[in-house]
Image: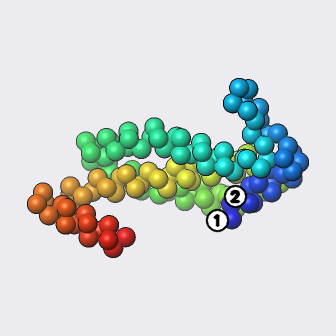
Amino acid sequence: MLIGPYLTALAQGAVGENGVIASLGLFGTITAKSFFPQCVSVSVFLQLFLLPVLGGIADYTNLKRRLVGMFCAFGSIATVSLYVVEGENYLVGGLLYIIANMCLGAPVVLYNAFLNDIASTPRRDGVSSHGYAMG
């Protein structure tokens, strides 16, 4: 993955090798070297709250296909938009990475909800096991 070293280099170019990007008070600071790992942490933390809600929506509505398409589109747009991040736009790059990573995790929950639609109750274990083995 090349985005980590790239965003780190942009941040270091803007604030120095280990310059402070943001002070979080009691929680410490975000430095240029910790910027990308912090972006990963934020995206995973946000997924902690988003994914269970999406699982419930997928199980109780008929929006699975639309939601998968929406997250695919937003994730693709965020990923392609990383191409134009340069210079001192490292914060925009971090935000785009957070959006892209969240959009990568969301369809995993949503495609699991399709199992009830593609297999009858007695065949679900076999279809799930086969799909997992093939993946």
Distance CA(mark 1)–CA(mark 2): 7 Å
**Does the rendering let one see residue 15?**
yes
- Circle 1 Cα neighbour tier, 10 Å, few/some/many (<14 / 14–19 / ≥20): few
Question: In this orientation, which residue lies closer to the viewer: 28 or 45?
Answer: 28
* Residue contact at pointers 1 and 2, CB within 8 angstroms: yes
Check disc 1 and report its element: helix, strand or loop. Answer: loop
96 or 34: nearer the eye?
34
Q: Residue 44: x percent and y percent? A: 53, 46
Residue 83 location (% of width, % of height): 70, 62
Q: Which residue ends up furthest to the top in the rendered image?
A: 26
The relative height of residue 84 versus residue 38 in the rendered view (above or below) is below
Residue 47: horizontal and vertical position, in percent? 48, 44
Q: Quadrant of residue 122?
A: bottom left
46 up-or-down from 12: above or below:
above
Residue drawn at 75 percent across, 60 percent down: 6
Task: Judge whether 2 appears above or below 65 on screen.
Answer: below
Q: What is the three-letter code of the residue carrying label 1?
A: Met
Residue 84 makes an appearance in the image? no
Dot 2 surroundings within 10 Å: few (below 14), some, or many (20 or more)?
A: some
Residue drawn at 84 percent across, 47 percent down: 18
**Residue at the (60%, 54%) spot, across then down:** 78
Per the rendering, the mark at residue 75 is none
Element assignment for label 2: helix
Q: How is the image coloured?
A: rainbow
Q: Which residue is mark 1?
A: 1
Question: Quick one: quadrant of the C terminus?
Answer: bottom left
Q: Amino acid at mark 2?
A: Gly
The residue carrying mark 2 is 4
